[in-house]
Image: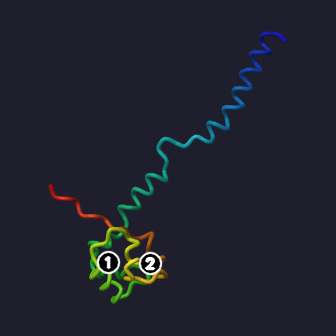
Amino acid sequence: MSFKKVLFTFFLTLALFSIPVMAAAPAPHSDSAKKSAVANEDKLDINTASRDALMKLPGITDPYAARIIAGRPYRMKTDLVRREVLPKSVYDGIRELIIARQPKKKQ
């Protein structure tokens, strides 16, 4: 084989093996990370939301809103089911819409 053929074969092999690696590499600034960060800002904080704001959530009636407010503060949004404030079926309908933010500590 001539030197040119060997060199061509080498670079062709290198190119073919690098394509799957480049395709599998994650993007440095993925849109999903940005979306989840933005989505958390749009979620309703169950520790500070008003009764009216809570009642705008699907499945949350006046008695459920009152129970959520009476049970504050929550460490996690799953506390709503764990403490039996809401039935799991109602919680499943709102879990993507809510968050339980913690108050900032005073220094």
Compared with 73, 29 (above or below) is: above
Q: Mark 2 or mark 1, which is nearer to you? A: 2
Give the colour scheme of this rendering: rainbow
Which residue in the rendered view is the most extreme toward the bottom? 63
Q: Secondary structure at mark 1?
A: helix
Q: Splitting the image into 4 quarters, where does residue 95 fall? A: bottom left
Quadrant placement of the C terminus:
bottom left
- Circle 2 residue: 91
Q: Secondary structure at mark 2?
A: helix
Quadrant placement of the N terminus:
top right
The x, y position of residue 87, in whole percent, is: 44, 83
Compared with 71, 19 (above or below) is: above
- Residue 80 is tagged as none
Q: Amino acid at mark 1?
A: Ala
87 relative to 14 in the view: left or right? left
The x, y position of residue 51, in whole percent, is: 29, 82
Compared with 14, 84 (above or below) is: below
Which residue in the rendered view is the most extreme toward the front? 82
Residue drawn at (45%, 52%), measured in percent from left and top? 33
Q: Amino acid at mark 2?
A: Tyr
In the foreground, 89 or 94 = 89
- Mark 2 or mark 1, which has the lower sequence index? 1
In the foreground, 36 or 70 = 70
Label 2 and label 1: CA atoms lie apart by: 16 Å
